[in-house]
Image (cartoon, coloured by chain):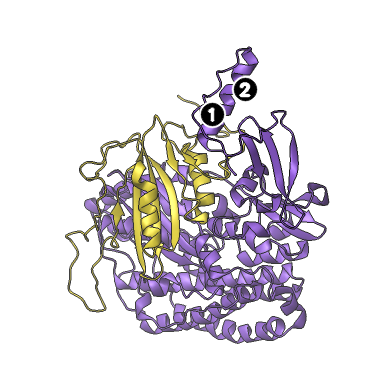
Chain colours: A purple, B yellow
Amino acid sequence: MEPTPEEGTAAGTDAVDAATGTPPPRPDRSGEVRADSDLAPPLSGETYFAPGPDGEPAGLVAETSEGSQELTRRGTTGAGELRREVGAVLRLPEGVVVDPSNIDVEQSDDNTMIINMGPQHPSTHGVLRLMFELDGETVLRTKPVIGYLHTGMEKTAEELTYVQGSTNVTRMDYLSPLHNELVLSLAVEALLGVEMPPRSDWIRMLLTELNRVSSHLMWMATNGMDLGSTSMMIYGFREREMILAFFEKTTGLRMNHNFIRPGGTAADLPDGWEDDVTVICDTVLPRTDEYDELLTGQPVFRQRTESIGTISAEEALALSLTGPILRSTGVPWDLRRSMPYLRYDEVDFDVIVGTYGDNFDRYSVRLNEIRESIRIIRQIVEKMPAGDYRVQDKKVTPPPRARIDESMEALIHHFKVFTEGFKVPEGEVYVAIESPRGELGCYLVADGSSKAYRMHIRGPSFVNLQGLPLMMRGGLVADAVAVCSSVDPVMGEVDR
Amino acid sequence: MTTAVQPTPAPAGGSDSGGASSRAPGRPVQEVVHPTRAQYLAEVGRFRSNGFEMCADLCAVDYLTHPDRRLPDGVPHERFEVVVNLLSLSAARRVRLRVQVPESDPVVPSLFDLYPGVEAMEREAFDLFGIVFDGHPDLTRILMPEDWEGHPLRKDYGVGRVPVQFKGAPGPR
């Protein structure tokens, strides 16, 4: 149905020439043999419905100077064409995902309305704005509108040294700040080519796994709140508080730690950390069983989550969705298992997958990932080696405070590391880790100076939001809140 | 030579002593391909049909102030670079495509038809770098306000500064 470019150009020329009053020369058709030459088409531009085989009008026929131009029925309009017609204000991620024949184009626009949810809606988990096209209470199309929290962190990163870089990235995904620090540190260390001491790897694993538990607990809490289960919110925050207290003891801060740095960690674990971590494990693990009792077995919760916001594995892969959303569709893809970093190949854990890719599967994947993380943490406590918590490379790591008083060299290195920073050899690297929300990647370009030439963070929430229009299509507005919650977007990371 | 696969070797400093206590450090194996703009779409399509199910990441880099970066022979040094990270879940393998995009004509074909998931990423690259993705269904700004002028992550786009005045600071003597 699309006019070829040649036809389009020809029609355009005709119009221009007609406007200037000089009719273009007709194309010479004398040599052509036209089968329908006796049915000379009327050139008045009239249109009529041609009768189909069953008597029903099969399609619209327009009489033009080029002959009869048959238009197909509206229902056969392709997805791409439809997208252009509606101005792509609201989008469906068509491509491979939606069958164009399923789009109900016969429906008049008068029956639908556009509703904005956000950016100040409490259950959008931040400043996410969702534009809905609604037919009654049914969501037809959705467009996530983002950017309200954009603070130019990638630009800022180009102005900061690598030492300062983790202060910047830790503010992106504020629910799992240690993962952000880790991915930047891994990228910088990959470019530096330094050999990390084993203890620093294990400390990093311990902290990021605890952070995964706290992030999933936070998700359980907010998801419970979104579905009306206020007690879950209280419980989720209560358990998360234990982990934050441990973080405060270790790093000095509850969030935005800047603890995992290029070259290791800022400090060693505090004395008695094994006891603290064991208490956390012993408390959170039995409480996941309580959540099971509270939510999993509850009919209201199941009705609000089962077969809501369904997405298939093919759709999730096509839309680059990762993390619990991808795993809930049955794809066993976890970077800790499939492309291990740190020492994840030395610990034993299961990758949790779902079956249907609905809200309930995403819930149960996250709930069971808490249990698996605790299983990993227990192994880390057993296997934690002694040794350095940061690499003993004087060009990268500042010397211990005590050395500064005794050694001129130490003072110089300290001064250089904290003013100029260390230089990273030229090159570029992409490193990805499994954050609680999916693949958290860092593409780092170094030009040989002490500042990143370009730092790009592939935020899992940013990409996962693309699944929303598909998950919400055909659902109810009331479920939209639940679906949005089950994607678990963190706007600090989406907008960066 | 227009396409070159170069697995980056681990730096020479990596020791191979083995054992649980130490392991070879360094860059994870990074496969990089340098297609031209004309080959870009076909090259990505080839990877797509060879088991790279997901486009993990797409971003752009502005090499305005770092023009003499290392590139394989035969690859021209243009100002912009579009970097695509493809991921094969079945083979647990990543491949990175770096496409050189000239400043005078910053247009590359969109990957939307191959990987619908690049929709937001291409919009981000358009928003922050001004690179036009031909064939993208809705190439509008995504992070910056719609009426914003300029593309902030370009290297010739200045960093905003707010003059800070400290209260009670002694003036210059």
Q: Residue at x 46, y 61 (%)?
A: A440
Q: Is residue B91 left or right of residue B3?
A: right
Q: Which residue is mark 2?
A: A15
For the N terminus of chain A, which image quadrant?
top right
Q: Is residue A339 visible?
A: yes
Residue A212 on image: x %, y %? 52, 71
Q: Is residue A15 above or below residue A251?
A: above
Q: Is residue A5 above or below residue A318?
A: above
Q: Residue at x 50, y 27 (%)?
A: B171
**Label 2 is placed on what type of residue?**
Ala
Q: Is residue B7 left or right of residue A229?
A: left
Q: Quadrant of residue A371?
A: bottom right
Q: Chain of mark 1?
A: A
Q: Is residue A482 left or right of residue A460?
A: right
Front in this rendered view, residue A419 or A453: A453
**Label 1 is placed on what type of residue?**
Thr
Residue A9: numbered disc? 1
Q: Chain of mark 2?
A: A
SS at badge 2: helix
* Alpha carbons under labels 1 and 2: distance apart: 10 Å
Q: Is residue A142 above or below residue A9?
A: below
Residue A25 on image: x %, y %? 55, 18
Q: Is residue A139 left or right of residue A256?
A: right
